[in-house]
Image: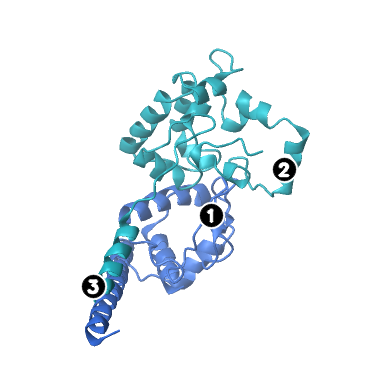
């Protein structure tokens, strides 16, 4: 590679890598805004510890086939899970899956469905804030 | 230098070329291209072919997504309407194409199976003793997971047994 080619190569790489880091930064801020929204609604600080308990506990107040989040999502936030119809679910932990929890519409839809399936009711804003804070920390 | 630009340009071209989907289907199902159907149904399971069940089955299934085989799969009314239209217009007793005709064989008038796995054609095709062993042999998690055995299922290819 001569110098000009080197320059072009470095410039291209910088643009590509720059794009990636910008998209991670914007994903992080979108997620933070969603969490902040639930924290505001709850009127109290979120707790990753409570989020972990919510995710891993055998609750069993909802539909009999789904007693816990982990029934489908895998034993821990870091693991892949499987829907009851056999489709793989990517891990919930943000470190494993940076695209998690960046679209409020999608987040709301899945909380609505899965809280009803597992808890037999909608989740409270505090539960949502705790849950997302835990997933963000993992 | 020119060579470098050429390589860069051609790699961009290759990356930008869309993957051409295969449309040849053994059962003659038209490919599913409705993005709402793909997004909403495909999040949890393979997007099943509407031609496998009659209209009445789809109406029952899609109007009770709040308890969808034991799970809450409810969706907003906008996309729901679109999904119902898609499925009822391609239902086994509505569409006159090979796949639909095959899947309505053996259905009594007004009969509405609750699942694809209880439709006459599914039962007929999986009635063999060998099939009974396949479910355990391949550790099929759910009979809704066609892909566990039929690798071309999403393209409507089920003749690989």
Look at 51% across and 47% down and name the residue there: A117
Letter of the chain shown blue in the rendering: A
Letter of the chain shown cyan in the rendering: B
Look at 59% across and 17% down and name the residue there: B107
Check disc 2 and report the residue beneath it: B134
Q: Residues within 10 Å of mark 2 (few under 14, many from 20)?
A: some
**Residue B29 percent across, percent down from the top left:** 47, 30
Query: Could you confirm whether marks 2 and 3 are on the same chain?
Result: yes
Circles 2 and 3 in contact, beta carbons < 8 Å = no
| Mark 2, secondary structure of its residue | helix
Based on the displayed image, in which of its 4 quarters is residue B84 positioned?
top left
Label 3: chain?
Answer: B
Q: Marks 2/3: CA distance?
A: 57 Å
Q: Marks 3/1: CA distance?
A: 45 Å
**Front disc: 3 or 1:** 3
Look at 27% across and 72% down and name the residue there: B3
Based on the displayed image, in which of its 4 quarters is residue A23 positioned?
bottom left
Which mark, residue B1? none
Circles 3 and 1 in contact, beta carbons < 8 Å = no
Residue B119 appears left or right of B136: left
- Residue B31's place in the image compared with B97, above or below, is below
Q: Marks 2/1: CA distance?
A: 21 Å
Residue A74 appears left or right of A49: right
Any part of residue A34 in sight: no
Label 1: chain?
Answer: A
| Mark 1, secondary structure of its residue | strand
Query: Could you confirm whether marks 3 and 1 are on the same chain?
Result: no
Check disc 1 and report the residue beneath it: A88
- Residue A85's place in the image compared with B91, above or below, is below
Q: Nearer the viewer, residue A135 or A115?
A: A135
Query: Could you confirm whether marks 2 and 1 are on the same chain?
Result: no
Check disc 3 and report the residue beneath it: B2
């Amino acid at each position: 590679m001569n110098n000009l080619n080197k320059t072009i190569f470095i410039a291209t790489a910088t643009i590509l890598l720059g794009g990636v880091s910008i998209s991670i930064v914007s994903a992080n801020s979108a997620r933070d805004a969603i969490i902040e929204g639930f924290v505001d609604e709850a009127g109290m600080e979120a707790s990753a510890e409570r989020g972990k308990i919510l995710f891993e506990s055998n609750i069993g107040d909802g539909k009999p086939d789904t007693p816990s989040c982990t029934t489908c999502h895998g034993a821990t936030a870091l693991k892949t899970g499987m829907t009851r119809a056999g489709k793989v679910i990517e891990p919930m932990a943000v470190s494993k899956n940076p695209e998690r929890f960046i679209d409020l519409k999608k987040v709301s839809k899945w909380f609505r469905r899965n809280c009803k399936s597992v808890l037999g009711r909608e989740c409270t804003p505090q539960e949502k804030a705790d849950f997302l804070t835990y997933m963000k920390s993992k | 230098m020119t060579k470098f630009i050429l390589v860069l340009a051609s790699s961009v071209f290759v990356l930008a070329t869309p993957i051409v989907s295969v449309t040849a289907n053994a059962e003659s199902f038209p490919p599913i291209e409705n993005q709402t159907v793909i997004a909403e149904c495909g999040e949890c399971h393979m997007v099943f072919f509407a031609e496998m069940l009659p209209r009445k089955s789809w109406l029952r299934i899609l109007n009770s997504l709040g308890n969808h085989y034991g799970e809450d799969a409810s969706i907003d009314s906008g996309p729901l309407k679109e999904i119902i239209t898609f499925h009822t217009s391609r239902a086994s007793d509505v569409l006159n194409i090979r796949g639909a005709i095959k899947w309505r064989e053996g259905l009594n008038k007004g009969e509405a199976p609750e699942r694809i796995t209880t439709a006459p054609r599914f039962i007929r095709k999986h009635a063999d003793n060998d099939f009974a062993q396949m479910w355990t042999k391949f550790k099929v998690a759910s009979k809704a997971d066609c892909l566990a055995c039929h690798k071309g299922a999403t393209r409507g290819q089920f003749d690989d047994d």
